[in-house]
Image (tube, grey):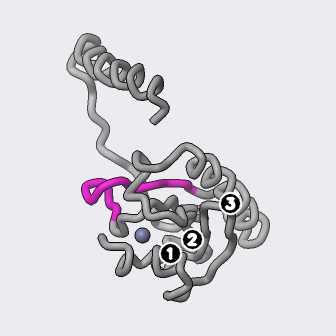
Amino acid sequence: MHKDICPFCRIVAGEASAEILYESDSTISFLDINPINYGHALVVSKGHFRDFSDLPDDVLLDATRSLKVVSRAILESIRPAGFNIFNNNGAAAGQSVFHFHIHIAPRFEGDGMKIRPQLKIYESPEHMSEYAKVIREKIKVNDKSGE
Ligand SMILES: [Zn+2]
């Protein structure tokens, strides 16, 4: 999505309104307009990055700190029984705005939100090891390159 029409870039630029909660060097936090529960907030990078895998390390660290600041404030003000922090990457994962954001959703007992996936079972220990092996190989490469 082009920066001029990206809804989150427009909020960052002050061209679209939002209930802004917090701002840090590289993030902004505001209320989600379609909340799971009232007080559901987003932490959004000020720069237009597509998703989590696209994020520079310094922005990731700043976003993590913002999550803590805003989560604590939600806990202390709205007093939910718990909260979820989650992030959708790609349409298949439920991402609808393709500008990096993390959700903070206050939770209450019996609030109707369900995260109950049908879990798979690996066919064998070797099958599981194959998945671990290809992931570890990429971690070795990516960790060294610092990306
Ligand atoms: Zn954007």
Magenta-colored stretch includes residue 94: yes
The amino acid at mark 1 is: Pro
Q: Is residue 43 left or right of residue 118?
A: right
Residue 52 percent location from the top left of the image: 44, 50
- Can residue 147 be seen here? The reply is yes
Disc 1 vs disc 3: Cβ atoms closer than 8 Å? no
Magenta-colored stretch includes residue 87: yes
The amino acid at mark 3 is: Ser
The range drawn in magenta is 84-95
- Which quarter of the rendering shows the N terminus? bottom left
Q: Which residue is mark 2?
A: 40
Q: Quadrant of ligand 1?
A: bottom left
Q: Which residue is mark 3?
A: 71
| Mark 1 Cα shell of 10 Å, populated few (<14), some (14-19), many (≥20) | some
| Mark 3 Cα shell of 10 Å, populated few (<14), some (14-19), many (≥20) | many
Q: In the image, is residue 60 above or below residue 25?
A: above
Residue 20 percent location from the top left of the image: 63, 79
* Foreground residue among 101 and 55: 55
Q: What is the spatial separation of the Cα atoms under label 1 and label 2, in whole angstroms? A: 5 Å
Q: Residue furthest right?
A: 76
Q: Residue furthest top?
A: 126
* Foreground residue among 138 and 132: 138
Disc 1 vs disc 2: Cβ atoms closer than 8 Å? yes
Q: Is residue 132 left or right of residue 16?
A: left
The amino acid at mark 2 is: His
Q: Which residue is mark 1?
A: 35
Question: Image point 28% across, 12% down: which residue?
Answer: 125
Question: Image point 44% across, 28% down: which residue?
Answer: 145
Q: In the image, is residue 12 above or below residue 115?
A: below
